[in-house]
Image (tube, rainbow, N blue to C red):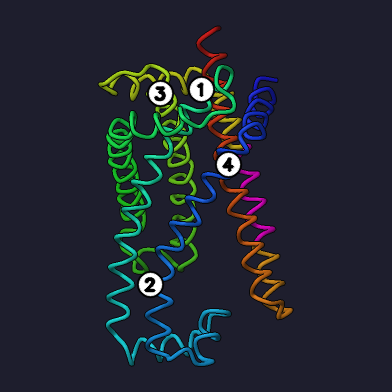
Amino acid sequence: MKIINALKYGFRLASLNLKLWSLLYLINLLFAGLVVVPLLYYLGGKLAMTKATDRLIGGFDFTLFNDFLNQYPEFLRLLSTQTMVVGILFILLYVFLTGGILTRLKNMETDLHRLGNFWTGCGKYFWRLLRLSFYFMLIHLSVAGLFFAIFSWSVAGGLDYFTSEAAIFFRAKVCFFLYGFFALFFFMVHDYAKVLVITNNRRLIFRDFWGAFRFVIKNIGTTFGVYLLLFGLFVLVSFFYGLLDGFIHQMGIPSLVLFLTGQVFVLAQIGFKLVNFGSMVKVMKNGVNE
C-alpha cells in the first residue's frame, strides 16, 4: 500500500506541474539544438548538402559514415571533443535543474502556480548537489572497480583453466547482474540524498549523505519497491519506443514523424523523473512521520 500511495502521489505531482514539465522540455530541446546544429552545419559544409547528407542524417548509413571518417578524420576529433564537453555540460545542467525540481515539488502545497521557487532552488542548491554527485561518482567508480576485480579473479587463467568460453561468459553475466543491482541501489540512495539536501537545507551535506543510506536501508521495502517499479515501467516504455522507432524506419515514414515520436519519448523521460522525485518526497514524508 505504501508503494502504491507513493506512486499515486508522484503521478499527481507530475500532472499538477505541467508548467514545470513544459519548461524542462524546452530547456532540453534548446540544449539538444545547441549540440546538434554545429554538427549538422559541419556535415552540411563538408558534404555540400548533397543527398549523402540526407542519407547520413535521416537513416544511419554505416558505409557512408565510415567513408566520411576516412576522408575527414578531423570530424572524429571534433566529435570526441564535443561529446566530452557536452557530457560535462549536461551533468552540470542536470544538477542545476534538480535543485529547482525538488524545491518546486517540496513546496507544491503552498506555491502551485508560480515557477519562482524553481529558479531559486536551481541556484541555491547547485553547489551542494554538485558535491553530492561527486561523492556518489566516486562510489560508483569504486563499485565498478570492485566487480571488475572480482570478475578478473574469477576467470584467472582464461581458456587454459576453463573448458569453454561459456563458463567465462556465465561469470561475466553474474558479475554484471550483481553490479547492476548495486549500481541501481546507489542511484536510488543518491536520489534520496538529493531530497534530504533540499529538505534539511544544510550547508554541509555529509549528514544528508549518510542519512540517505540509513533511511533507504530502514525503509528498504518501500524505497526499493517504488524505485524498481518505476525503473521497470521506464524500461517497458523504452522498449516500446524502440519497436516503434524500428517500425518507422522500416516503413519509410517521413523523418518528421520520427522526430515527433522522439519528442514524445523525451516528454515521457521528464515525466518519469518528476514522478520518481514526487514519489520519493512522499516516501520521505511518511518515513519521517512514522
Identify the residue position indicated by label 2 in the image: 38
The quarter holding residue 260 reads bottom right
| Range drawn in magenta | 229-241
Q: Amino acid at mark 2?
A: Pro
Kindly identify the residue that appears in the image at 30 percent across and 48 percent down.
145
Magenta stretch containing residue 155, yes or no? no
Among numbered discs 3 and 4, the one appearing first in the sequence = 4
Identify the residue position indicated by label 4 in the image: 21
Front disc: 2 or 1? 2
57 or 30, which lies in front? Answer: 30
Within 10 Å of the Cα at label 4, are there few (<14), some (14-19), or many (20+) other Cα atoms?
Answer: some
> What secondary structure is marked by label 4?
helix
Within 10 Å of the Cα at label 2, are there few (<14), some (14-19), or many (20+) other Cα atoms?
Answer: few
Residue 128, x across and y down, in percent: 30, 30
Residue 112, x across and y down, in percent: 59, 25
Q: Amino acid at mark 4?
A: Trp
Task: Tell me the distance, in whole angstroms, between the alpha carbons under discs 2 and 1.
Answer: 38 Å
Eyeballing the image, is 261 above or below 43?
A: above
Residue 37, x across and y down, in percent: 43, 70
Residue 55, x across and y down, in percent: 55, 86
Identify the residue position indicated by label 3 in the image: 198
> What secondary structure is marked by label 3?
helix
